[in-house]
Amino acid sequence: MTAPESASRPDAGTSVRGFYARIGLVVFLACLLVTGGHLMSPDGELLFRTAESMALRGALDVHPIEYDEATGTLLVPPQHTFATVPGRGGFHVQYLPLQPLLTVPLVWLARGTEATFAEAFFATMPGHPTHFTADAISTWRRAVVVALFNPLVTALTALVLARLVMMLTGRNRRAAAWTALLWALGTVALPHSRTYFTEPLAGLFALLAIDQLVRWYGTPLRAEFAMLRLRQMALLGGALAAGIWTRMDSPLLALGIGLALVGVGEFKRRRENAYGVSPGCWPWKDYVLAGALTVGSFAALVLFNRWRFDGGASLIGGGYSEQPEGVALTTPLLVGLHGLLFSPGKGLLFFSPAVVLGLWGWRRMPRHLMWFGAAMLVAYLPFTLAMVKWQNWDGGWCWGPRHIVQLHAPLMLGAAFLFAGCETMLRRVVLKVTAIVAVGVQLFGSLQAPMEFYHEFYRTPMDGLAFRVAYRPTEYPVVMQSFAVQLRDPQTGRPGAEVDPGWLPAPLVDSLYIPQHTQWAGYPAMLKDGRCDWWLLARVLPARQESD
């Protein structure tokens, strides 16, 4: 990483481009294989409604999601709206507009093909209250978006990850392919490609910024390379600017990557000055360009939110500040850290076991790349601390730790140093066994729709699928669990008569901390009951059963 980009060009040449293309194609096809063909959350539904409004009406307002507060079911006309705020021209979602804007071509594609495919596809989709659709056209449009958008984002992220590994390991294709494919197929990236959440896109933009940071580090500070460095900074700043318009937590990633850029730049300047490569140079123009794009993007977003919400949103929180829960970092640090790492319902190490290889690999990073390890730590630390402290750290009804999906790719970069290093029999066995387990976990996590699991297992107990929950179920728009209080006999210590202090709401404790009440136990029960959310597999299984 000491040669300029124009000299080394690790990704130049048709054969290398073909190598990247093959990785992206494999990942895209794998994501397409496990797609469910429907939206999986109210968040995704509102983002889709925004994209549809942009594509078909040229507007930003949406029809809100309507809930019956007693049962949590959808209603028309509205009684209780979810994640929407009154604004200019109607209701606006609290989410940011870049992902819906990028989805507009897919909505046009769906609209252009719905006359041919919608009715036939609708006949294959089982009805479920979490699908948010009731007719063939709306079902087809959502299916096209879900089946293409995040699979494409995941494939592009795998490509960028492979390119980063090629630069860091001296063009080691084996390390690049293993790292990219294991990230895509062995972490929550695969199940989350089935959704329309915004975390995959935000993670892609952050990784693109890191890619340009690495390239900038390899470009000398001499004047003859000034235009190349400015191009790299324009791409870095552009990636951060796009991320800011994707998710409200992306400014934290921009802050971390900006600090990493300054730190790497100072190290680079001193090193080159010491060796006489670029005496007296200070890359202030590079910093100004990247900073101007990033800060300008954030300022434009603030003005945009003030405009679309008619001045009703806060400067920082946007539409989130208008929701009942507000914007708060109230989770105790150790509670959030334990939950995101070790809880059976959301823990990173349970849901993405491939990350263990990444953590192991970071310890084996070559000494000449220590600057990169330090830069990655600085880049992602503010975001990580905020997600640990975030009031909704668990991410709600989804597979795994949703709010730190963006961390998985940088964590997996460490695995590249394992795949690029010298091999022993023991290491080969460990790597292959871990890879098999990791991919198996993600295939398992893709078998069902998380919202359907929570909708059926954590409501009023039903025959068949419902768990014997540890706490009494009660009905809210988003179903919560509650404690039952009993008097304890002072002599024996045994629970006695039950008292009714009113309901004492508890968080998502059942599905977070009690293994037998998590998706690990619920998904097999749904599969045994004949449920599978892979659209392709679900089409094959009934035919096979009938033929038998």
Image: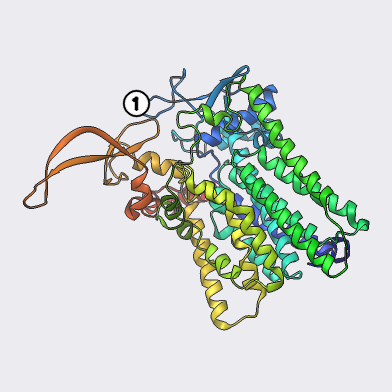
Q: Residue at x 61, y 45 (%)?
A: 252
Nearer to me, 282 or 238: 282
Quadrant in which residue 87 is drawn: top right
Residue 204, image x and y in percent? Answer: 67, 49
Nearer to me, 167 or 431: 167
Residue 539, image x and y in percent? Answer: 51, 47
Q: Could you tell whether 504 is left or right of 201 in the image?
A: left
Nearer to me, 130 or 501: 501
Q: Is residue 431 visible?
A: yes
User: Which residue is most to the right?
Assistant: 224
Q: Quadrant of the C terminus?
A: bottom left
Instruction: Look at label 1 and name its amino acid.
Output: Ala
Residue 52, image x and y in percent? Answer: 64, 28
User: Which residue is most to the bottom?
Assistant: 425
Q: Residue at x 46, y 35 (%)?
A: 130
How dense is the environment of label 1, judged by Cα within 10 Å: few (below 14), some, or many (20 and up)?
few
Quadrant in which residue 501 is drawn: top left
Local SS, label 1: loop
| Structure colour scheme | rainbow
Asked if residue 306 is positioned above or below residue 416 in the image, the reply reads above
In the picture of the structure, the residue carrying the numbered disc 1 is: 70
Q: How many marks?
A: 1
